[in-house]
Amino acid sequence: MKNWSRCIIFICFIGLLSLLIAMPMPVAAQGEIKVGAVQPITGRFAFAGVHINDGLADALAMANEEGGIGGKKIKYIMEDGTYNTDVAVAAFKRIMTRDNPIIMYGESTGLGKAMAPEIKDRYKVFYSSTSFSGELADPAVNPYVFVPGPTYGDMFGILLKYIAKEKPGAKVAFFYSDTEFGKDPVPYGREMCKKLGLDLVTEEVAKVGAVDIASQVLNLKRKNAEYIIFQGFVLSPVPEIIKQAKDYGLKAKFMGTHWGTDKIVLEKLGPLANDYMGVMPYAFWWETDNPIIKKLRKWNEKHYPDMKYRPTSYMQGFFTGQVFVECLKRADKAGQLNGDGLVKALQSLKDVDSGGMMCRPYSVVNNKIPYGRVFKGNAEKGIFEPVSECMEIR
């Protein structure tokens, strides 16, 4: 009987040893740090996704050229999520199972919200994404998630504060897509309108890429909206809405959040670009005196000789990579290259110099970076120009 007990103990010991051997080695011991990403390389946001992916990959590649993380190289692993939540969730889980990265990047608000419980309780992986969702930036609910800029709610707050200063009591309308992306900041925007004494006259909803938006535009005209804030669209149908509104004689100013503040919108608007404004936390490609833009232009000339312009989506990906690298350096120095160590590193970021990528040295507040400026389109130059100082929302 004793021999049988010893045999069972021995078998259990061998099984446990085999399991331990099969488990992934700590990143520091491997001499390689894995960063995974699910990007919208194809699908309806592919025109932005390709640049987001390049920006993030370039930030990590630059870090490797400059010595890596304590001598360890960063390995970037990417799969296409097609901007479809089911496809993206499967890709996320596949990367986590196969590669076990300590950082993940996601393609959408939908993916972030779908994976949030498992990121917190199962994977404990440091996570960021294309999304500026206020829900994802809540450290009490999502401690491993950070938003690489102001939340969509913060962006609404910045635009609404600008409106309240320019025209107190103005009539405001929200025009958003029927997606998580579109709906995210609306409750906060309603609260801010009340707080600032602005009159929220209507909320209009449309599908991404909608063609028939005549009824919504007519309602904007009936309500005599003076400022219209778009959310949840990157391009279409925003230019079409503005053109129809002007055809109906609506004298309004139009505004977008980060993903709608890009040169491509101005190009589609033509002369109407002078009536379009947006909020942006990052530098633009045409800011040629900016140190980080100088560096990025030189990098792109070397690695992408045919690429003559980089949109705001590239800047978002690149800045996220900058934060990843800074957190990795701090976590490595502390000897804690894992999700918890990266969260501690994130929360230690105070007045960090981004080389000019952000409108001021950045600090992390509640797992977000709440700074941005208001810009106005210049139709003749085809660029956005600043019309406000760097603003912070707390």
Image (spheres, rainbow, N blue to C red):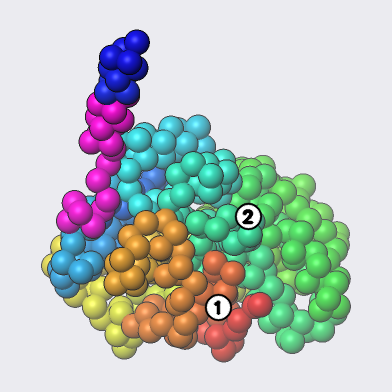
Give residue 295's position: percent from left, percent from top. Answer: 24, 78
Quadrant of the snapshot with the C terminus: bottom right
Main SS, magenta residues: helix
Percent x, y for residue 297? Answer: 24, 74
For the point 66% across and 65% down, which residue is it?
153
Compared with 298, 48 (above or below) is above
Label 1 neighbourhood size at 10 Å, few (<14), some (14-19), many (20+)?
many
- The residue identified by callout 2 is 141
The kind of secondary structure element at disc 2 is loop
* The N terminus - image quarter: top left
Badge 1 is on which residue? 371
Residue 39: % across, % down:
39, 47
Disc 2 to disc 1: CB gap under 8 Å: no
In the rendered image, which quarter is residue 322 located in? bottom left
What range is drawn magenta here?
A: 12-31
Q: Which residue corresponds to the image point at 27% horizontal and 41% vertical from the top-left?
A: 24
Image spot of residue 233 (x, y percent): 57, 54
Q: Residue furthest front?
A: 2
Residue 347 as seen in the image, left or right of residue 284: right
What secondary structure is found at the residue carrying circle 1? Answer: strand
| Structural distance between the alpha carbons of marks 2 and 1 | 22 Å
Residue 10 drawn in magenta: no
Please state if 97 lies on the left or on the right of 108 as rendered: left
Label of residue 187 in the image: none
Total tally of numbered discs in the picture = 2
Depicted 37 relative to depicted 318: above or below: above
The amino acid beneath tag 1 is Tyr
Q: Amino acid at mark 2?
A: Val
Q: Nearer the viewer, residue 35 or 125?
A: 125
Of mark 2 and mark 1, the one earlier in the sequence is 2
Q: Residue at (31%, 66%) from the top-left corner?
A: 335
